[in-house]
Image (spheres, rainbow, N blue to C red):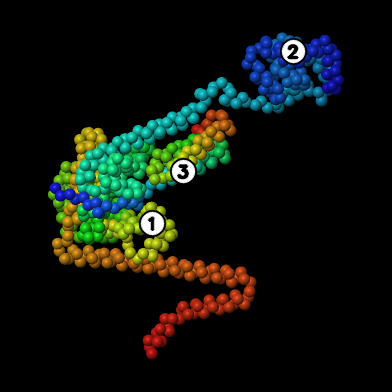
Amino acid sequence: MWTAAKKIKDDDFSEFDDFDEDEFVVEVPSSSGASQLPIKTQSKKSDVVYNDGSSQSSMSHTTEQILSDDVTIDEDEDDDLMFDEEEFETSDSFPSSSSSVSSISDLKITEVPTNLTGNHWEAYHCEAVMVLVLLGYLINFLVGRSKNARLASIIYRSQRDLLDRNFALVGDNGQTRSIQSTDDQMNNDLTTNNMHKESESLYILWCSGRTSIENMLIEIRFIKRQCLFNSLAAMIKSINDTIIYTIDYSKDDMETFVFCLAKKRCAAKLHRDMNDLSQFCSERKNAEKRGLSGNYQILNEIGEVSSTIIDNRVADFIEKFPDALEYIHISDQYTGMKVQNDTQQPSPNTPNPTNSPPTTGTAAQQQDALNTSERSVRRVLIIAFNLVARNDRSLQVTTESIGSDYLRFVLHLIERVSSFRFTSKESKTKAIKNRQRIEEQFLKNVYQQRQEQAQQRREEKRRAEKEKIMQSDDPERQRKWEEKEHKREMKRRQPKMKQMKVKAM
Amino acid sequence: MTDNRRPARIHRFRPSMITPTDDAIPDYMNLMGMMFSMCSLMLKIKWCAWIAVFAALVGFANSRTSDDAKQVLSSFMLSISAVVVTYMQNPAPMTIPFLQ
């Protein structure tokens, strides 16, 4: 019936046949604007714009856009409407007006994607925020990095002369094959003209070749200004930049004692975390008795040490720079921090051809540590200073003025420690006793661990054997193995009794 | 003034002499960057890709000089490619789930 209707329509309007659909296609863009065209092209298959009284023809024949301002289409529409009603008013299969409404409402109208709506860049506000945040972080990174670098070079310049006068080797990154004379070094190696950069917030300088000490490592630990989060956290937690001087002595250059003078806030932490301080120093005393401010505490193993180390020079320094000194840690039994010591033994003074980085603790390293029945200890003097802006000056100006003062203090302490020897015999015996006690504890631990490991290995071997036997499916072999196991168990339980019997005889 | 320098007592620097500190930020950031990149590529989530870029940047800022530059660079590349691919798949602007 639908085809019949189409034929009749064609006959009636045959004179307009040529203009049938083309007319509509041509006239639509000419009468309306260009904006209709893209919509028209999109809607070829699915989109239909509903217009009053024109639904039938558009649905049944083509998918043209019927516009209210298009006269020709309306005309045609009216004719079609009349014609359709005449022909099909009783027909159900042919879409009537009511069903056409529902069928049109069934049609899915897809949304035009937002990026084609015309609001191009305004819609991407989240992305803009992200990009701004990233740029802000990047700018902070560059600014923070350059500030740290500038501070490091200021410190280096303020201390370099004094270091050159005291050390044969200043600045070594450990990678150049040979150490040339200082003149050549200045020309070749970048590290000698500045500190060696370990990270954006850690600069180091290695000095060696001096009487009474083996080497000195200067570490400058800056606040991580290059990371936005860290610099904000530092502001909240009031963390400072610190310079840490770590001096290694050889065996003969230092007396055997453990001592620490520290600010209250870090004395507790050091006492808890450092192996040697927790093993050798039993309590924390206030430093007021020694003439220092109540801000400092002393951890001491041998009584006479504190009066020797804390002399007038130290007191004057603390008075002149009240917040500068963070801690002085002197130890001949230095093994690092407690947590790490479970997995590693720090590098000893004896030369070690394969130096693994201290923070990794593999099973092999643990095994090596157990095999050596010697504790690897270092004889160290560690002095930590805070870098704080003084007297309302900027940090840079302060650093320039105090750099050499700190170094002079360090050199004085180096001499003091290397020249100190116990005056009383009791001190010496006490020190020896303490060290023997700790050594015994250590050996016991090592022995225990070795036993445990051996036990574990035996268990595993037996388990492997058992599995092998069980899998072999040979009842004879299984029975034999079980008998052997039984005998082994009996033997293990019996030996004590046997020994007693022998003794009685 | 006596000269305290002794060229005979020179010892070479060993990297293990540096006081070890617990600083796992660069490793965490690398891991985070990779995870969020994969998340954004698989699940086509835009904000994951942006967080991956951020994590790569933070990891780079906190990295040590002795660390391999290749790892940091690969982290960056992965996160930027995640952003690009996610936007190519769906050019619509990003929507943050809990804000809308």
Camera-nearest residue between A96 and B55: B55
x%, y% of residue A238? 30, 40
**Helix, strand or loop at mark 3:** helix
Which chain letter matches label 2?
A: A
Judged from the image, the secondary structure of the residue bearing numbered disc 2 is helix
Tell which circle, 2 or 1, labels the residue nearer the N-terminal end: 2
Q: Which residue is painted at 61% across and 69% down in the image? A: A471
- How crowded pointer 2 is (Cα within 10 Å; few <14, some 14-19, many 20+) is rated as some
Classed neighbour count for the residue bearing mark 3: other residues with Cα under 10 Å, few (<14), some (14–19), many (≥20): some
* Residue on which the image places disc 1: A354
Please, which chain is the residue tagged with disc 3 on?
A: B
What residue would you read off at disc 3? B71
Judge whether residue A51 can be spotted in this image: yes
Give the left or right position of residue A500, taking residue B50 as reference.
left
Can residue A97 be spotted in the picture? no
Quarter assignment of residue A11? top right
Along the line of sight, which residue is nearer the eye, A267 or A458? A458
Which of discs 3 and 1 lies nearer the camera? The answer is 1
Residue type at mark 2? Answer: Glu
* Picture quadrant of residue B43: top right
Q: Which residue appears at 51% of the width and 27% of the height?
A: A124
Q: Amino acid at mark 1?
A: Thr
Looking at the figure, which quarter contains the N terminus of chain A?
top right
Give the amino acid at mark 3: Gln
* Residue topped by disc 2: A23
